[in-house]
């Protein structure tokens, strides 16, 4: 029997709100009944503060599931229980993934998943057809409203098992920001450069020339995220007792204000590096 969930908010990007995972999560969590917006989710996940760069400059550097996994960090901070299913359609675990997705839909919960329409964007699985392995979904930035047929296998699916959020916003923000220093600390996290290490790698390898387009795309994403970081700290930072708050806001504002349209790529990299070094002193 076919089943589709209705009245789920659309996944709609705006000027500085373009991360498909967090837009999908915002849609899901509002459908459940929580008034938590994109800004709050991106900040609480620490994605707004993360600098994450893969050695080959893959655009996966911008994804929430790479490096420091901000998607699952958010779920943990909110106190939710979840299961992540990952794998190809022809792998042994695929039938179980289908069963888990169908069960979630039957419980009235959409499933966050990537690769629903042959793109690397995240969206929501919102239903299934007569053949339960045929899914319906809401896609990132789709042109028409309502659930559409999912055209490709969901390579990663995040299935919520417990959705209760019992903490106050103050408690959530305080817990989230406990690890703010971690996402700024130079090092390797799950194969990705974390913090200023990735920027140093780009500069030392002169990738700002060799891979200029990718470098600019990644740093534009970081710049846009920092705009959210500033707003998040201005709204919620005072409630947490975080040290050097005004200094952190000032530095993130500097990153958010870097002119991506007119600055040379090398200069953009060097400006980000200089600010990231200052941020480390305030963590």
Image: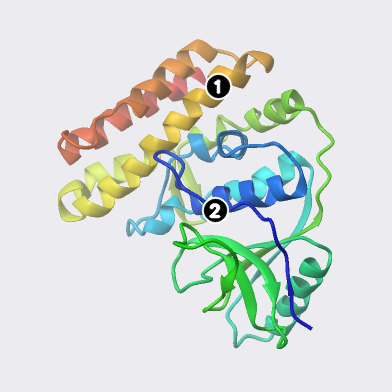
Query: What residue is shown at x 54% (from left), y 18% (from top)?
Result: 234
Mark 1–mark 2 distance (CA, rounded to whole Å): 25 Å
**Percent x, y of residue 66:** 51, 55
**Percent x, y of residue 25:** 63, 50
Front residue of this view, candidates 179 and 107: 107
Q: Would residue 124 appear left or right of 162 to someone viewing this image? A: left
Which numbered dot is residue 40?
A: none
Res 8 seen here: yes
**Percent x, y of residue 189:** 52, 50
Residue matched to label 1: 233
Label 2 packing within 10 angstroms: few (<14), some (14-19), many (20+): many
Res 155 seen here: no
User: Mark 2 falls on what kind of element?
Assistant: loop
Query: What residue is shown at x 66% (from left), y 43% (from top)?
Result: 74
Which picture quadrant has residue 135?
A: bottom right
Residue matched to label 2: 11
């Amino acid at each position: 029997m076919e089943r589709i969930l209705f009245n789920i908010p659309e996944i709609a990007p705006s000027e500085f709100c373009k991360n498909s995972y967090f837009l999908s999560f915002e849609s899901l969590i509002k459908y459940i009944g929580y008034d938590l917006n994109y800004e709050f989710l991106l900040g609480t996940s620490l994605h707004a503060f993360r600098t994450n760069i893969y050695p080959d400059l893959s655009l996966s550097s911008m994804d929430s599931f790479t490096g420091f996994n901000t998607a699952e960090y958010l779920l943990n901070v909110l106190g939710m229980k979840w299961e992540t299913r990952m794998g190809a359609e022809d792998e042994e675990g695929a039938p179980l993934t289908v069963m888990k997705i169908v069960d979630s839909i039957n419980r009235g919960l959409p499933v966050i998943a990537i690769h629903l329409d042959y793109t690397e964007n995240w969206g929501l699985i919102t239903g299934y057809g007569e053949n339960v392995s045929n899914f319906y979904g809401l896609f990132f930035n789709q042109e028409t409203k309502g659930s559409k047929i999912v055209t490709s296998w969901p390579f990663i699916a995040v299935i919520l098992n417990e959705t209760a959020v019992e903490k106050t916003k103050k408690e959530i923000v305080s817990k989230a920001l406990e690890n703010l220093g971690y996402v700024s600390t130079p090092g390797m996290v799950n194969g990705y450069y974390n913090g200023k290490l990735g920027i140093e790698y780009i500069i030392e390898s002169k990738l700002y020339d060799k891979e200029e387009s990718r470098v600019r795309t990644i740093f534009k994403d970081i710049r846009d995220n920092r705009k959210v970081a500033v707003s998040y700290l201005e709204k919620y930072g005072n409630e947490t007792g975080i040290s050097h708050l005004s200094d952190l806001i000032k530095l993130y504002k500097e990153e958010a204000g870097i002119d991506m349209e007119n600055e040379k790529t090398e200069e953009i990299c060097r400006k980000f590096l200089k600010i990231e070094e200052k941020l480390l002193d305030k963590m």
